[in-house]
Image (cartoon, grey):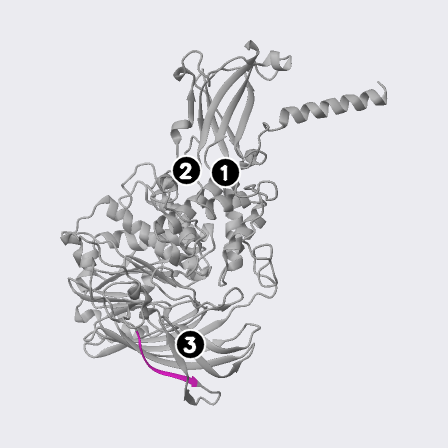
Amino acid sequence: MNTATVYRLGVMLCGLVLVVSAPAATAQNWRNIDGDVQSKNHSMFRLIDEWPDPNDQRAASGFPGKDYWQQQVDYVIEATLDTVSQSIHGSERITYHNNSPDVLDFLWVQLDQNVRSIEHSRSYKTRGALPDSIPARYRQYFNPTPFDGGYTISRVQLVDDAGNLADAKHRINNTIMRVDLAEPLRPGEKVQFDIDWSYPIPFSGRGAKEKVRDGWLYEMAQWFPRLSVYDDVNGWQTDQFLGRGEFYLNFGDYDVKLTVPWDHIVEATGILQNPGDVLTRTQFERLKTAYQSQEPTFIIAPDEVMTKESRPVHSGMLTWHFKAEDVRDFAWVSSQTYVWDAAGFQYRDDQEPIQIHSLYPRDAMPLWDKVSTRATIVTLETYGRMSLEYPYPKASNIHGPVFGMEYPMIAFCGARPGPDGSYSPGLERALIGVTIHEVGHNWFPMIIASDERKWTWMDEGLNTFLQYYGEQDYAKKFNGTEIWTQTTDGTYPSRRGPARGIVDYMRNPNQVPIMTESDIIQNNFGNNGYAKPATGLVMLREHILGPEAFDDAFRRYSERWAFKHPQPADFFRSMEESAGEHLAWFWRGWFYTTYSNDQALVNVTAQNAENLMGTTENGANYYRIEVKNEGKLLMPLEIEVTYDDDTTERFDLPADVWRNNEIEFTKGFFTDKKVVRVELDPDEAFADVDRENNVWEAASLQEGETGGTRDSNDE
């Protein structure tokens, strides 16, 4: 065969390959067309323009850059709980370290309690009118005279190098306060200033009070003026606290003294510095024993609550002294009503045990003594495996009026039995879930400290994702014991995580994208910030990247950004970098749009393989499964085929099947068997909003109907 003949044959074969492999000719194969189709790239696989350009602070890898910096703020605080006036009074000295490359003339301070101040609260000012009709049972929730709380700031003074005090010019702007400096604060320098303050403790909110059977309990959160964050993305982050978007805070060291009535038990962020002053010798010895086991041990048993024997003194006030290093916040609780149990947890035998504490009133038994400490330990196990090992010396869970809120080393959780001590399986699951979730927040955002004032999903969504696996681990760990009796197969009926749980929301026309700032999400906040991002990450782990690649990438993100401030693009880029996949199609569809997934099985046809290929070597029949993307979202294509001998075969295809044609794709394969059933997304893994078009069955078709099997050579 001469060279010209070989060349011509090669051209013919190349053309044949192009004809066979090319997608069907269409005017446009992009699924989501907006604007000029001739001059704009509309592919879901295109790069995401919204991501900021990499720089020396935030690298293209998604990890901190070579010149990454962040500020440090240290606090020394003394506060007194006044149980007569139901208020708190405090004084703090703040040391602000300027690690930025910028010169600062003033500092911004967060005054979160002002969200309840009639004078200062924008949340109060922007409330709409009451509805025309309010059922009697709901009227208690519509208070026409809102609680008037907020700070009274009685002193703001700068401290010079000699320790002298001078009044600082300051200005309150609703929930933030600007403090002007006497001199510009240059890079590498630090400044100290003092604030004295007080406020009445509210009945509701993230920090609140509640009267239970044995007396009052107090959960103190967002309780002291805290520095706003100055960073390389925002400059000063001065978003007002409106109640929904949560907190963006600096890391630092805390030295805190809390003075409370003698009969109160206090728990807080950090390690207790003076146990000999505030605990009995019996309690101290019980704690040492408790830390040697994962099984809870009573430090204050139910019959010891409010007895004189449970306290080292019997009158006046006691000061509890705590210290915490490298934390971004500090919270505490105080009550005379607490039952207290404790345990210890170690990742390795050579470690000092992490102290695990649960405090709750007797009203919360028998549920809390069964669940709280055990669920806390499961959280440390699961999150330590999937993210990073818990770095702090203590983790506590406290029952009170706040159903679920999180702070470094301490969580506030609700859910308690009825007055007769009875509780439903659903209430037990509620306590398990909220404990795992709130203790889990130690990772996101307490350690991997995102800006949750703006991006709810970066803490709530990532945390809910890990909560799903924590719940499953809880059921597996205690399956077959009296601790977990709700299922017999070691599974947990998680509310968020599995894709089928988000389908109704994906059908909802009143969505906004996940990538919407917290305070402008009007409806479906829980689905937007918690459930949808968690479900997306479960999809990504289980069906797109696979557990090995995902887990490696997620751990690297956690480790690189621990004790730092990641932004959304940092997460997206770091996951791609470590997993080795460009995931623009996924981030764009799931996080940046409200598109839904609807894969429709259009047709299943059969062709005689010998007529097609001249051989039956690969199988007697060649089947084509035609799928149309009726939704605007792109997802992998998972197909389960059932044959006439009751065997099945799976085709798990990547989202790349839509790369050249986002509207339709036809899967072809050879087999000697007869196909009797085909199902798309058989595991319900991709939140398909219309499963009525996901199944084809041979018996369901009447003779002559399209979609049946046929031999195309009969035409």
The quadrant of the picture occupied by the N terminus is top right
Q: Is residue 588 visible?
A: yes
Q: Nearer the viewer, residue 330 or 641?
A: 641
What's under tag 1, amino acid-wise? Answer: Leu
Q: Which residues are magenta?
A: 151-158
Task: Name the magenta segment's main secondary structure.
Answer: strand
Is the residue under label 2 in contact with that under label 3 (CB below 8 Å)? no
Tag 2 residue: 687
For label 2, count other residues whose C-alpha is less than 10 Å away and answer few (under 14), some (14-19) or many (20+).
Answer: many
The residue sitting at the top extreme is 714
First along the sequence among labels 3 and 1? 3
Q: Secondary structure at mark 2?
A: loop
For label 1, count other residues whose C-alpha is less than 10 Å away and answer few (under 14), some (14-19) or many (20+).
Answer: many
Residue located at (43% from left, 39% from top):
596
Q: Is residue 616 visible?
A: no
First along the sequence among labels 3 and 2? 3
User: In the figure, is residue 647 to the left or right of 315?
Assistant: right
> What is the x, y in percent for residue 238?
43, 68
Number of the front mark, 1 or 2: 1
Tag 3 residue: 178
Q: Secondary structure at mark 1?
A: loop
> What is the x, y in percent for residue 59?
60, 58
Residue 189 figure quarter: bottom right
Q: What mark, if any, has residue 634 been given in the picture?
A: 1
Q: Is residue 15 shown above or below 269?
A: above
Q: Quick check: is 236 in the magenta stretch?
A: no
Residue located at (40% from left, 59% from top):
442
> What is the x, y in percent for residue 150?
29, 72
First along the sequence among labels 1 and 2? 1
Residue 669 figure quarter: top right
